[in-house]
Image: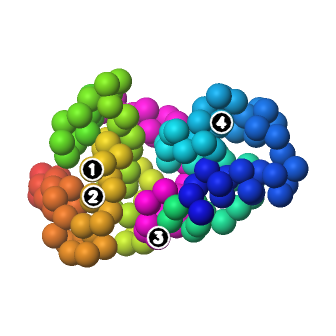
Amino acid sequence: MNFGEFLRSARVKRKITLRELSEITGISFSQLGKIEREEHKPTKENLLKIINSLEIDSEIPLRLLGYGMTTNKKEIIDPLIRYKVLVRDNFKCKVCGKEAPRFAVDVDLIVPKTFGGEVTVENMVGICEECSDGRTKFINEEGLEKEFLYTKYKLRNLLKDTN
C-alpha cells in the first residue's frame, strides 16, 4: 500500500469527501487529489493537517512517505516562532544554503525534544526537507553529539555564557 491508497482508505472509512477534507485542512481539492493519486508528496505541514483531520496515528503515513519512525507526532510550530527563525536565517537552509522561494525551507529543532530540546527561536534553524531528513538519519545512526548543527549550537551557547 502507498500513501495515496492509505489516505483514500482512511478518508472513505470516515465518510469524508475530498472536498470536505479540503475544507477541513485548508489544502486545495486539486492538491489532495494529486496526493491520493501519488502525483505529489505532501509537505510535512500538510501531512500533519491530514493526520489531525482524519484522526489517524502518524506512524503508518510517516513510514509510507519515507519519513521513518523518527517523528513522533511532530507538532505544528507556532507561526510567529517559525517566521522569526526564517527571517533570522534569511529564508535559507543553514546546512546546504538552498533559499526560499525556489526551494522549500522550513524550521527544525537543533536539539530535538527527544533529547530535551524546547521550541524556542534559539533552538531552531531554517532547513530544507532533504537536509532535515539526512540530519534525522545521521542523529539516529551517529548520535546528536556528532551532529554539525548541534555542535555549532553548543559552541554558540558556550561563547554566550563566557561573555
Q: Amino acid at mark 4?
A: Gly
Q: Give the spatial CA distance, label 3 vs label 4.
A: 26 Å
Q: Residues within 10 Å of mark 3 (few under 14, many from 20)?
A: few
The answer to whether the residue labelled 1 contacts the one labelled 3, judged by CB atoms less than 8 Å apart, is: no
Find numbered disc 2 in the image and state the secondary structure of the residue it sits on: helix
For discs 3 and 4, the disc positioned in front in the rendered view: 4
Of the image marks 1 and 3, the number of the one nearer the N terminus: 3
Of the image marks 3 and 2, the number of the one nearer the N terminus: 3
Q: Give the spatial CA distance, label 1 vs label 4.
A: 27 Å
Tell me where residue 90 appears, x and y as whole percent. Answer: 27, 28
For discs 4 and 2, the disc positioned in front in the rendered view: 4
Q: Quadrant of the N terminus?
A: bottom right
Q: Is residue 118 above or below residue 128?
A: below
Of the image marks 4 and 2, the number of the one nearer the N terminus: 4
Q: Give the spatial CA distance, label 2 vs label 1.
A: 5 Å
For discs 1 and 4, the disc positioned in front in the rendered view: 4
Q: Residue furthest right?
A: 15
Q: Which residue is labeled 2 in the image?
A: 134
Residue for point 21% across, 75% down: 142
The answer to whether the residue labelled 1 contacts the one labelled 4, judged by CB atoms less than 8 Å apart, is: no
Tell me where residue 16 appears, x and y as whole percent. Answer: 84, 45
Give 78 or 57, whichever is nearer the viewer. Answer: 57
**Range of the magenta residues?**
65-88
Q: Give the spatial CA distance, label 4 vs label 2.
A: 28 Å
Tell me if 127 is positioned left or right of 68 in this view. left
Residue 6 seen in this snapshot = yes
Q: Which residue is labeled 1 in the image?
A: 131
Q: Is residue 141 above or below residue 32?
A: below
Q: Which mark is residue 69?
A: 3
Tell me where residue 44 appears, x and y as whole percent. Answer: 50, 47
Residue for point 32% across, 52% down: 132
Residue for point 81% across, 36% down: 20
